[in-house]
Amino acid sequence: MNETTASGMWDQLKGKIKQAYADLTDDDLTYAEGKEDEMWGRLKEKTGKTKDEIHKQVADM
């Protein structure tokens, strides 16, 4: 998988997550090198779910 394909898949996944949780913003879902922990913290705070619960829900999308 090349970087363009991965980026496209991430954009699709972000759209699905934002549909499920309307209060999430693009900033909340920004995945940048070194910022992964910050992204997970925002997701956990806004969804009220654990990292494992979020992983499972995303896998089911």
Image: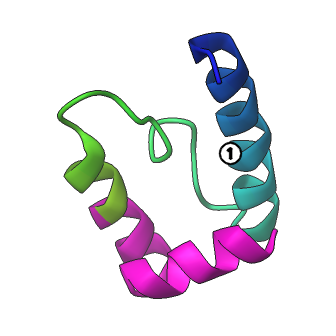
Task: Pick the residue in front: 23 or 38.
Answer: 38
Total count of labels: 1
Specify the principal SS of the magenta part: helix
Q: Residue 47 appears at what percent x and percent y? A: 52, 78
Q: Residue at x 24, y 51 (%)?
A: 38
Q: Residue furthest left?
A: 34
The residues colored magenta run: 41-61
Q: Quadrant of residue 6?
A: top right
The structure residue drawn at horizontal position 58% and vertical position 56%, both measured from the top left corner, is 24
Question: In the figure, is residue 19 to the left or right of 31?
Answer: right
Spot occupied by residue 30 in the image (x, y as percentages of width and height): 45, 35
| Residue located at (45% from left, 47% from top) | 28
Vertical relation: 13 (above or below) 50: above
Residue 21 drawn in magenta: no
Q: Which residue is found at the position 41% from the left and 36% from the top?
A: 31
In terms of image quadrants, where is residue 3? top right
What's under tag 1, amino acid-wise? Answer: Lys
Q: Quadrant of the N terminus?
A: top right
Q: Which residue is mark 1?
A: 14
In this picture, residue 56 sits left or right of residue 48:
right
Position of residue 34 in the picture relative to residue 29 (left or right): left
Please say whether residue 50 is one of the residues in the magenta stretch. Answer: yes
Label 1 residue SS: helix
Quadrant of the image containing the C terminus: bottom right
- Color style of the picture: rainbow
Most extreme residue toward the front, as rendered?
1
